[in-house]
């Protein structure tokens, strides 16, 4: 693919030149974020080196900058762990919702169900947070206590839950929250599967379920892209998570304990960070880690999205 | 021999179980929406009833007194200002970006623009807030509404740009060729003919962006300051917004705060759903 388009006339050249600056908008946004995050992280990187990403400490004594020590390991761990739980919740829900709308919802109701899906995807995350804080957390406390009692020998439920504000609560909320969005991405792809594939499956004697599984296997790249986008949403979510995750620097395989994510750590600590010499810088270093996580996850999503578009072009 | 192929029992059971699982999981996926709507309406109405619907939208909050909790007027005004400014900024940038991506679909440079824009679509929004804090807020030397609008515009811009380019994709080629044959310049052709043909799709993209701008909290955390008692007095002055108010108030001890948070959530939900439903109705009418 050539980098520059073929421009046939002066009019074309003028049009192209006028629009070329838009290329730099997205680039400028990404680069200015990276620059700011790096510059503000320098003091803590200078002081603690890369161990700020790998240790789990948060010592912020008042009026004693020498005693300050920050490590983001718990927040990075919590970010990935809650994202993973969110994926485990949203994958079966999103795939089922997408398939159900296309296969089982009567035509007359399809518009209604997809409108509901859109509304659920557009519901502000702070409302999910409010709901999860007041209703999901108490429910999760009961569920997790039950799981701890009967499956406590598993490392995931080894700690007794004290409150409903846990890693698991945040993960489940994020999963619920990102399901409708992932479902609409999967459904978009499912709709575009050529009908001859479906007909071929049925003509070979496949059952409905077997046909669905076959059709889903043809849009695998788009399912991966949808799940990457859901993961990106989960990783980036800030306020809703900070309301339910319990805000504690814990690294434990158990999902029944409170934790932190990078975003919720920034949201919770930033207002007070100005009172300490290095805390702001440490939070920006967390932002830097989040930047790279977000970049990788979104790049994976875009890559698989493109791959699917290429495949659909060949079918 | 029967005309239907015989299906072994095990496959039939798998089929029934599989289909049932899909339907149950799909219902489960949507069920939180109903519960959320129900509890937001029920809890939200309590504060709105005490204050009166119009006063709730206009009056300042009075969270210390749960019997007269007041309203969300200043925060709602803040959200209105932020959404208006964000729309201006993001439309001004998203329109040419979407046009660039759609018009030069085969060129590497516009592919690159699309990929970078797509990467930004789900980028962690808290980072946008931090970046605007470290630049604009530091420069102005206090939290201000303009900073919030800039942060929201950066969050919303990629959504709108992708929607615009998608909408332009479906405009038939012969329309633009007709415009060219009349001697119109490319600029005129695209912005007067192609854009007006695709206007519904573009409008939908803009409305989805507006709904997102109204509901986002994280970009506002370190930018607008979070003042909910007084109306914002200028673009370079601090202010508040409805989602931010919910976030701050629900964390305060005291019933008055919580009632106001739920009432604010109801207002926010109604605004976002109304915008989305208008957008959906727009989608249905796309006919050429």
Image: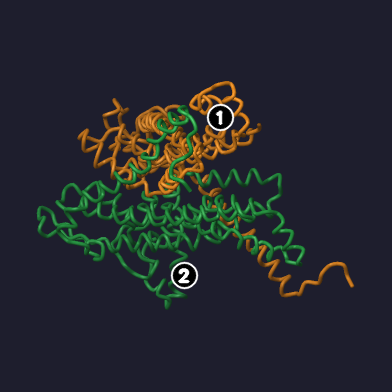
Chain colours: A green, B orange
Res B269 visible = no
Which chain is disc 2 placed on?
Answer: A
Label 1 crowd bin: few (<14), some (14–19), many (20+), radius 10 Å:
many
Q: Residue at x 34, y 57 (%)?
A: A261
Which chain is disc 1 placed on?
Answer: B
Residue B89 image point, x, y percent:
38, 31
Same chain? Circles 2 and 1: no
Q: In this orientation, which residue lies closer to the viewer: B10 or B55? A: B10
Instruction: Give the foreground label among 2 and 1.
Output: 1
Rendered-image quadrant of the C terminus of chain A: bottom right
Q: Residue at x 21, y 38 (%)?
A: B138
Pick out the residue farthest to the right: B1
Side (left or right) of B12 relative to A131: right
Residue B131 image point, x, y percent:
28, 43
Residue linked to disc 2? A146
Residue linked to disc 1? B194
Residue A252 image point, x, y percent:
34, 69
Q: Residue at x 69, y 63 (%)?
A: A211
């Amino acid at each position: 693919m050539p980098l520059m388009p073929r421009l046939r006339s002066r009019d074309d050249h003028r049009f192209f030149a006028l629009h070329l600056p838009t290329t730099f908008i997205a680039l400028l946004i990404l680069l200015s974020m990276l620059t700011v995050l790096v510059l503000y992280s320098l003091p803590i990187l200078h002081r603690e080196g890369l161990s700020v990403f790998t240790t789990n400490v948060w010592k912020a004594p008042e009026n004693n900058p020498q005693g300050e020590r920050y490590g983001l390991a718990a927040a990075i761990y919590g970010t990935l762990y809650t994202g993973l739980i969110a994926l485990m919740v949203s994958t079966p829900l999103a795939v089922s919702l997408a398939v159900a709308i296309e296969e089982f919802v009567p035509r007359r109701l399809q518009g209604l169900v997809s409108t509901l899906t859109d509304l659920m995807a557009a519901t502000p995350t702070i409302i999910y947070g409010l709901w999860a804080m007041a209703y999901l957390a108490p429910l999760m406390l009961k569920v997790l206590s039950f799981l701890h009692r009967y499956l406590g020998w598993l490392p995931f439920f080894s700690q007794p839950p004290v409150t409903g504000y846990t890693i698991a609560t945040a993960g489940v909320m994020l999963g619920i929250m990102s399901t409708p969005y992932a479902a609409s991405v999967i459904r978009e792809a499912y709709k575009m599967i050529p009908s001859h594939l479906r007909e071929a499956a049925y003509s070979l004697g496949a059952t409905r379920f077997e046909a669905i599984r076959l059709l889903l296997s043809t849009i695998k790249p788009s399912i991966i892209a949808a799940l990457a986008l859901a993961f990106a949403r989960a990783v980036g979510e800030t306020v809703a998570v900070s309301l339910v995750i319990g805000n504690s620097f814990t690294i434990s395989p158990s999902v029944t304990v409170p934790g932190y994510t990078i975003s919720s750590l920034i949201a919770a600590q930033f207002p007070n960070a100005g009172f300490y010499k290095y805390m702001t810088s440490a939070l920006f270093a967390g932002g830097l880690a989040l930047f790279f996580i977000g970049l990788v996850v979104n790049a994976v999503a875009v890559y698989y999205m493109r791959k699917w578009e290429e495949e659909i072009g060949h079918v | 021999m029967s005309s239907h192929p015989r299906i072994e029992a095990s496959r039939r059971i798998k089929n029934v179980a599989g289909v049932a699982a899909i339907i149950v999981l799909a219902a489960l996926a949507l069920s939180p929406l109903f519960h959320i709507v129900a509890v937001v309406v029920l809890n939200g109405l309590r504060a709105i009833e005490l204050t009166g619907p119009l006063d709730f939208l206009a009056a300042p909050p009075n969270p210390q007194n749960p019997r007269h909790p007041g309203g969300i007027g200043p925060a709602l005004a803040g959200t209105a200002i932020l959404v208006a400014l964000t729309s201006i900024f993001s439309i001004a940038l998203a329109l040419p970006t979407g046009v660039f991506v759609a018009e030069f679909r085969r060129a590497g440079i516009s592919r690159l623009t699309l990929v970078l824009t797509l990467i930004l679509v789900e980028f962690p929004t808290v980072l946008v807030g931090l970046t605007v804090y470290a630049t604009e807020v530091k420069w102005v030397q206090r939290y201000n509404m303009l900073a919030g609008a800039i942060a929201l515009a950066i969050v919303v811009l990629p959504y709108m740009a992708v929607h615009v380019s998608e909408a332009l994709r479906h405009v038939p080629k012969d329309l633009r060729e007709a415009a060219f044959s009349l001697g119109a310049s490319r600029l005129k052709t695209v912005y007067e003919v192609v854009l007006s043909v695709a206007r519904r799709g573009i409008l939908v993209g803009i409305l989805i962006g507006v709904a997102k701008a109204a509901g986002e909290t994280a970009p506002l955390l370190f930018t607008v300051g979070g003042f909910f008692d007084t109306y914002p007095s200028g673009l370079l002055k601090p202010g508040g917004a409805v989602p931010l108010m919910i976030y701050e108030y629900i964390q305060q001890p005291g019933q008055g705060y919580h009632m106001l948070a739920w009432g604010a959530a109801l207002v926010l939900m109604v605004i976002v759903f109304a915008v989305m439903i208008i957008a959906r109705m727009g989608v249905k009418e796309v006919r050429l």
